Image (cartoon, helix red, strand yellow):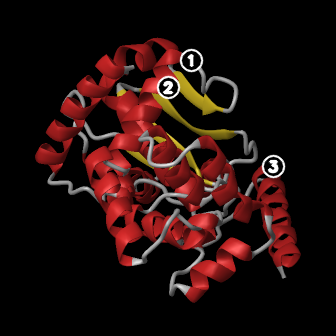
């Protein structure tokens, strides 16, 4: 993997220069996906709460366009890492994606070599080895710590905008902590609300540790739908079916209800019922 690490560092250096990215690009990682230019086109980004939570994301290829789909039912920190992972595939595995039409990211294929390299890329892009190593030493000294504690990990987590476990794993990879200390630091994740409480005490929100459940569709995609609707090429019935795949209704995107076919009306009522049930459940 040492050879891969050198190659990855070179690619990331070029990516940072091309898109003016600093060492803390976790907060803008979704924007980065939409800025990357491949075959004179930008990938389309979809962030949706998947029903299959084992699937963290996938890349699709259709009509000569690449689309990245991310599962916003995973924690935001996990979703950020998945986004960086998918950037590697966009840059390095275009032929594979086009050949297979869909390249999925699930828990079953994480040990494959290509996936391991993509993870190395994501870790270095989001948590640069030299930078996070220096920050680790600085925080240890400034807090007069003999060994790292959960407070140090949370501060690093918020700085690099990733999930808590991504920081402990990265520090172990860089030999800043050993396997035993990693396990000790991760025990806070097994204690209900403890990570949230400690994050609050440090002045941070819990957004990285919980799913955003955001529904984000590409602006160009929504614009095309709007233009087709205005031109009469897309009916309201079509919108119901189209947005139904996201478990949303046309009203969510500002469309007024029109005359519906029985099939479209039944689908829309089903979606409304499901969303209403989910909303009531949260209360």
Q: Can residue 79 be seen by looking at this rendering?
A: no
Q: CA distance from mark 3 to mark 1?
A: 43 Å
User: Which residue is located at x 52 percent, y 62 percent?
Assistant: 147
Report the quarter where the C terminus lies: bottom right
- Disc sitting over residue 186 in the figure: none
User: Which residue is located at x 56 percent, y 18 percent?
Assistant: 112
Give x and y (percent) for residue 225.
45, 53
How packed mark 2 is, by other alpha carbons closer than 10 Å (few <14, some 14-19, many 20 or more), is: some
User: Which residue is located at x 80 percent, y 74 percent?
Assistant: 279
Looking at this view, name the residue that lies furthest to the front.
146
Q: Nearer the viewer, residue 245 or 53?
A: 53
Res 258 quadrant in image: bottom right
Q: CA distance from mark 3 to mark 2?
A: 45 Å
Determine whether 108 is above or below 22 in the image: above
How many numbered marks does the figure carry?
Answer: 3
- Disc sitting over residue 112 in the figure: 1
Give x and y (percent) for residue 239.
60, 54
* Residue that numbered label 3 is attached to: 263
Q: Nearer the viewer, residue 235 or 24?
A: 24
SS label for mark 2 = helix
User: Which residue is located at x 25 percent, y 24 percent?
Assistant: 7
Determine whether 47 is above or below 113 in the image: below
Report the quarter where the N terminus lies: top left
Q: Nearer the viewer, residue 113 or 6?
A: 6
- Disc sitting over residue 116 in the figure: 2
Tell me if label 3 and label 2 are in contact, CB under 8 Å: no
Q: Nearer the viewer, residue 23 or 14?
A: 23
Of mark 3 and mark 1, the one earlier in the sequence is 1
Give x and y (percent) for residue 277.
87, 70
Tell me if label 3 and label 1 are in contact, CB under 8 Å: no
Left or right: where 258 falls relative to 232 = right
């Amino acid at each position: 993997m040492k050879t891969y690490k050198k190659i990855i560092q070179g690619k990331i250096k070029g990516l940072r220069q091309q898109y003016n990215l600093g060492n803390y690009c976790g907060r803008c990682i979704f924007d980065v996906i939409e800025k990357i230019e491949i075959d004179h086109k930008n990938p389309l980004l979809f962030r949706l709460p998947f029903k299959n939570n084992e699937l963290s994301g996938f890349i699709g290829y259709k009509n000569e366009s690449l689309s990245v789909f991310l599962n916003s039912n995973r924690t935001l920190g996990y979703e950020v890492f998945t986004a960086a992972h998918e950037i590697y595939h966009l840059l390095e595995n275009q032929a594979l994606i086009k050949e297979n039409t869909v390249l999925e990211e699930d828990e079953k294929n994480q040990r494959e070599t290509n996936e391991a390299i993509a993870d190395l890329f994501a870790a270095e892009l989001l948590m640069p080895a030299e930078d996070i190593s220096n920050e680790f030493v600085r925080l240890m000294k400034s807090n007069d710590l003999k060994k790292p504690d959960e407070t140090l990990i949370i501060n690093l987590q918020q700085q690099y905008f990733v999930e808590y476990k991504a920081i402990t794993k990265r520090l172990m990879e860089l030999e800043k902590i050993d396997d035993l200390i990693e396990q000790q630091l991760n025990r806070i994740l097994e204690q209900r609300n403890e990570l949230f409480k400690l994050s609050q005490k440090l002045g941070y929100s819990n957004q990285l540790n919980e799913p955003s459940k955001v529904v984000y569709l590409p602006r160009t995609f929504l614009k095309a739908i709007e233009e087709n609707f205005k031109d009469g090429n897309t009916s309201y019935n079509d919108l119901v079916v189209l947005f139904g795949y996201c478990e949303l209704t046309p009203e969510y995107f500002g469309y007024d209800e029109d005359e519906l076919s029985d099939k479209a009306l039944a689908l829309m009522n089903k979606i409304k019922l499901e969303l209403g049930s989910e909303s009531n459940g949260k209360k």
